[in-house]
Amino acid sequence: MGQTRWLDEEQQQAWRAWLDVNTQMFARMSRELQASSGLSIQDYDVLVALTDVTGGSVRMRDLGVALQWEKSRLSKHLARMIARGLVARRDCADDRRGAFVEITEEGVAAIQGAAPDHAELVREVFFDGLNGEQVRELTTICRVVLDRLDATDR
Amino acid sequence: MGQTRWLDEEQQQAWRAWLDVNTQMFARMSRELQASSGLSIQDYDVLVALTDVTGGSVRMRDLGVALQWEKSRLSKHLARMIARGLVARRDCADDRRGAFVEITEEGVAAIQGAAPDHAELVREVFFDGLNGEQVRELTTICRVVLDRLDATDR
DNA sequence: CGACGAAGGTGGACGCGTCAACCATCGAGG
DNA sequence: CCTCGATGGTTGACGCGTCCACCTTCGTCG
């Protein structure tokens, strides 16, 4: 192995800024979602995934793939959401190992209450300060990194 | 309150890409750090903060501010790192409530072992795909968002 | 049909983060 | 000197994520 290639000054600044934005943005989103609707970001993600599908009913397996969650994590999180009445479980006739999850009326109400505020926060903090060119550039950058993450995955 | 201003198509793509990069980058960094050196990202951050300071010894209070960690989180994490021999606690003569944390030789060895691989990963995945202009643009974008996070903090 | 590996989902143990209560100490004001 | 609020740090309870063992069911291959 050769010498370590360290980050130069500009790269360090970029890296720091990137990490800070992630941390703070996430904290802020958590706080506001929790305060305005009692949902965690994870709850929100689950409910969004369920409303994205026609019928609002999905096999757990597929939901896990969509969210990129481990099956055990999904199982436990859904158990809590079921206990809170946000979603319901339904057995699968075709495959008796399987289970469907569907969003309840309460779940629909919760996500409909939360979504506008959440979207507004994302706009206000993230997009209202950027012009169209910057948004496109950012998308490009993220895609480059995503590709490289996949490409170098061992 | 008026109508909800939803995200347009481009913004949604940017937002998705951004969230995905965060998730995957974080997962990847965790995995590789853990595999190559047995450190978590949090361990790494603590050790970096300690080596940044001359003497490698810091008041817990100041470390907490630097890392933006709650004092309880810091206290517990340091307890674990002390148990593993990565850092040590030293009482503070001036203020008997206080405590210094210092990095041990083992801690130095761990961070020195981990840092090159970590830097290489960040370069490889993040910066090697971007040109200088993109890096500067990204920094600008992150700073805009950080400012807006502060400015709209309630 | 019967065996067997793979897939869907659950549950327990453990590590980690947050919240709130707590204790000791400090320092400013009377 | 004494009181009292603020500060530094620890601890316990709880929620969440990961890892791994486990159970059931499925589908394939003989």
Image (cartoon, coloured by chain):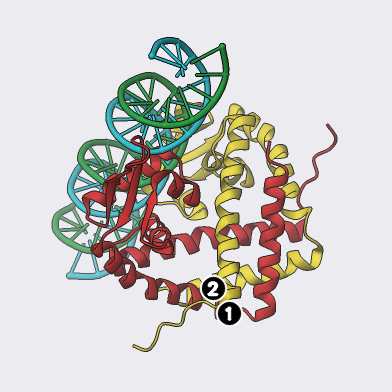
Chain colours: A red, B yellow, C cyan, D green
- Image coordinates of residue A4 in percent, x first then y, are 80, 40
Q: Are marks 1 and 2 in contact (CB under 8 Å)?
A: yes
The residue at which mark 1 appears reads as A129
Q: Chain of mark 1?
A: A
Give the camera-side residue of B147 and A29.
A29
- The spot of residue A9 in percent (x, y) is 76, 58
Which residue in the protein does label 2 denote?
A: A126
Q: Identify which residue is drawn at 56% across, 67% down.
A: B15
Res A134 seen here: yes
The amino acid beneath tag 1 is Gly
Pointer 1 local density, CA inside 10 Å: few below 14, some 14–19, many at least 20? some
Q: Residue at x 67, y 68 (%)?
A: A138
* Residue at (62, 62) in percent of width and height: A17
Q: State left or right for residue B128 relative to residue C7.
A: right
Q: Residues within 10 Å of mark 2 (few under 14, many from 20)?
A: many
Describe residue C9's horizontal placement relative to residue C20 as left or right: right
Which quarter of the rendering shows the N terminus of chain B?
A: bottom left
Quarter of the image where one finds residue D25: top left
Q: CA distance from mark 1 to mark 2?
A: 6 Å
**Which residue appears farthest toward the bottom when viewing the image?**
B2
The chain carrying label 2 is: A
Mark count: 2
Q: Secondary structure at mark 1?
A: loop
- Amino acid residing under circle 2: Phe
Tell me residue C23's x, y (percent): 21, 41
Does A55 appear above or below B95? Answer: below
The residue lying at 57 percent from left, 40 percent from top is: B30
* Above/below status of B14 relative to A67: below
